[in-house]
Image (cartoon, helix red, strand yellow):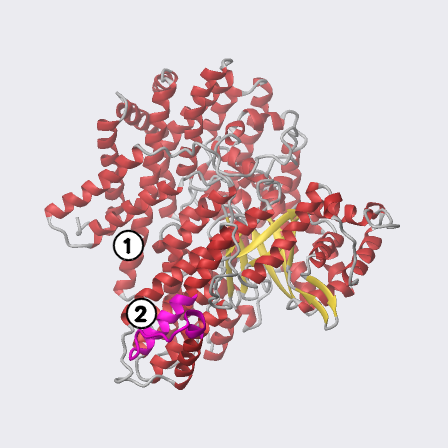
Amino acid sequence: MNEIPQDQALERDVQLFTALLGEVLREHSRKRVLVIVERLRDGFMQLREQEDAELRDKLMKRIESLDAQTLSEVIRAFTIYFGLVNTAEELNAHLVRMERIADGERLWVGSFDDTVRQLQADGVSVGQMQSLLEHLRYVPVFTAHPTEAKRRTISENFRRIFLVGQDLRCRKLNDEEIEEKLQEILTQIQILWKTDEVRIHKPQVIDEVRQGLYFFRESLFEAVPLVYRFLEKAVRRSYGANHGIRVPSFIRFGSWIGGDRDGNPLVTPETTELAVRMHGELVLTAYLERIRVLRRMLSHSSALCQVSPAFLDSLDADEDYWVEIMGQSQRRFLHEPYRRKLAMMSHRLNANLSRLRTRMEGRDPSHLPKGYTSDRAFLTDLYLIRDSLMQHGDANAAGGLLQTLIRLAETFGFHLVHLDLRQESIRHTTAVTELFARQAGAPFYQAFTEEQRLMALAEAIAHPHPFVIDKTTLTAETRETLEVFEVIARMRAEISEQVFGQYVISMTHTASHVMEVMLLARLAGLAGKDQKGWFCQIQISPLFETIDDLARIDEVMGTLFAHPTYQALLKASGNQQEVMLGYSDSCKDGGILASGWSLFAAQKKIIALADDCGIACRLFHGRGGTVGRGGGPTHEAILAQPVDTVHGQIKFTEQGEVLSYRYANPETARYELTMGISGLMKASRCLIEPPVAERNDYLGIMDELARYGEAAYRQLVRETPGFLDYFYECTPLDAIALLNIGSRPSHRNKADRSLESIRAIPWVFGWGQSRHTLPAWFSIGYALERYRNNDVERLAKLQRMYQEWPYFRALLSNTQMSLFKAELRIAHEYLRLAENRAQAETIYSKIAEEYQRTLTQVLNVAGLRELMEETPELQHSLARRNRYLDPLSYLQVTALGRYRAEPEAEKREEWLDPLLRSINAIAAGMRNTG
């Protein structure tokens, strides 16, 4: 087992897991489920190799004959198969990386080893490297969008299979031990078979918070310190042991879970308060666990080493604290100074935790002892121990678990993540309008022009007492809006000033939308002007989502940057502006080409504007899991950003199933963080050397392609009769809305079936489930063909763009993946569900024609014979899934048809179960469907 060549190991693992799954099905499933699974899989594999009308008809009859319960079990088997394949691929990718590291050779592109070697070879000096590292800030933001279908308990099962699989591959085992390991995997698969992967109840927001915390507890607390350690090793390898370069702690995490209230009425001020406290509870618990281990390790005797004077002073201060709290001297560890210190630190952290939990229970903690006043005080104690150890020659002891804890504390503080809050601009405008209306003699705010609104808002923000507010007279919506800002002020005081990140305003159309939020913050004491001058304890990130809004980004931000009041508040908060860019809605609005290019142009405009105004600007990328929502490999995505716009900092959302894929296992989390950070380092070279600007001819070609693409997309989506009916009827959108995978509604307004009302996530999710994957590729073929116009020289120009320009290469590489995941023959099967079949056929023919056109054009421009030829591992991974995805899609069409056609509610409910399970299964198989 240990001698399997690496190139065969993955297939062997997949075969092993599949065989064990077969054993479980044979023993524990309904009669003939295993036979049905195998015949469907084998039959559809044959059809992929060669069409056979008789075989296809036979397979469809078999599917049509299945009752609802058997259908559910067959789908469940496919779901577990995908989970096992994902686990095998993740395990093998990790082992391949470890083998390359063990060989001592130069590592893969995107590794720290390769990146730092390249920078050093390119002449980046020690000083430049230090400067680059000090400017870095890498901020993934976890969100709870409704595309992650996997329950936390399922994730834990697959984690156990991963670890046992690693033992099988890495440890020297005898035959008996191998058999025991195989039995462990079999047991876990059996447990998976008897665990319901579909949630019985729709998750509450707090359930989603717990799901987010899982990734920190099980993975990131282990992975993050190792990422820093590997970067330090890479620097040491390239610049020598005495280089003097210090790697700062530049990773931070954000979250929207419990803070994103845009369109989700379940996210209340109380929810946000509880989420913040749950973050604090987890991180304090993590520190206490590690302090306990350190206390057992650092058993140095004061008789055998001399601690530093600063450390001794801190022990004296600890003694004073102990006497005040306990009424007596600390008698433990009198001659073991580090243990004494760590015992005191443990007591303080426990005090922090007790006060926090008391508040979570709704009780007053004022009678409880106080712990650390801030995370900075906790870090100071850790630094004192480290510096003292190093002073008496124990640097190796300082560099182990203690340094790991320091990295954790520097990264996570007492807050764990920076919780962003988000709300739609209309809610703020409504609240401000009501507040103005309640003031005696005040004019009607909504009748104001934009200029008048800005003037009124500025005056109110600067006024010591802008409004007389009687909350009992306000509407419930306005009261809640005000309470959100009061929670911000309260939690900052209770836990940490770092507890919140940005206040994100969706659908920002004007400068007044930002100033309205600043006024609401002023009413909570978070911003304004006092005797000392301007102060601002809130940072606001306007979100530009539609094509039109992206085009006007410089107009809106230019107005803000020029406004004296906003200038003063921005300066008071650190003179850094964050701007969020929405990938999902802009893609739904204008198509993938227009969206991507509008985002590219918007970034260049806002960074240039901020530079001219002397303001630091960080871009926040609202990416989804799929290409249709800005997804794709992080390393390549960062390198594809416009030149001279990534100034050491990047922030981006990690959504849906991407969280499980990237962060559920610490081994993979380490790799994903490394790839993203190395991309950030490369893209930020403009900070230490003059950047090479993009070629103007390439920019001009993209302008043209984007115009053609937007026209073609809008013609299909907005001008084709019956197109939205096609979307509603020929995708499982109605079932997605019933699936208990997220607390957020699929529509902004349930009664509204317009394109604007559909949220971008179910829009992409629905097209992915029905195997169209349309948002990720539609219009690209038309744009390329129209630009080329059968001109050989123009084709050659596009081919050079693909080879030379990271943006264009990433665009077409992602398009290839989306085309590969699409399966138009299967998509056509969903037309059976259309009420107007003839109209649906017309629409389908347009989609199929553009698919073929896009396939041809992309392959021609990329110079390839088949899709994903340049990424064979990913190509094989997707092909491996198709064995089971194809029959699953036919099973879904059958379940969806039966569900919609059944007039009796009770019988209809029987078909809902296999239908919802099919959505889970296809999501697991395609891996980034939403």
Left or right, 39 with reference to 176? right
- Per the rendered image, the range of residues in magenta is 321-348
Is 322 magenta? The answer is yes
The spot of residue 311 in percent (x, y) is 40, 81
User: What is the quadrant of residue 644 in the picture?
Assistant: bottom right
The spot of residue 748 in percent (x, y) is 63, 36
Nearest to N terminus: mark 2 or mark 1: 1
Residue at point 45%, 56% (across, down): 281
100 or 538, which lies in front? 538
Residue at point 75%, 49% (across, down): 470
At numbered mark 1, what does the secondary structure look like: helix, strand or loop? helix
Q: Name the outermost residue toward the front.
A: 327
Label 1 crowding class (10 Å Cα cut-off): few <14, some 14-19, many 20+? some
Up-down relation of residue 395 to residue 222 (above or below): below
Majority SS type along the magenta span: helix
> Mark 2 = which residue?
295
Q: Name the outermost residue toward the left.
A: 175
> Mark 1 = which residue?
95
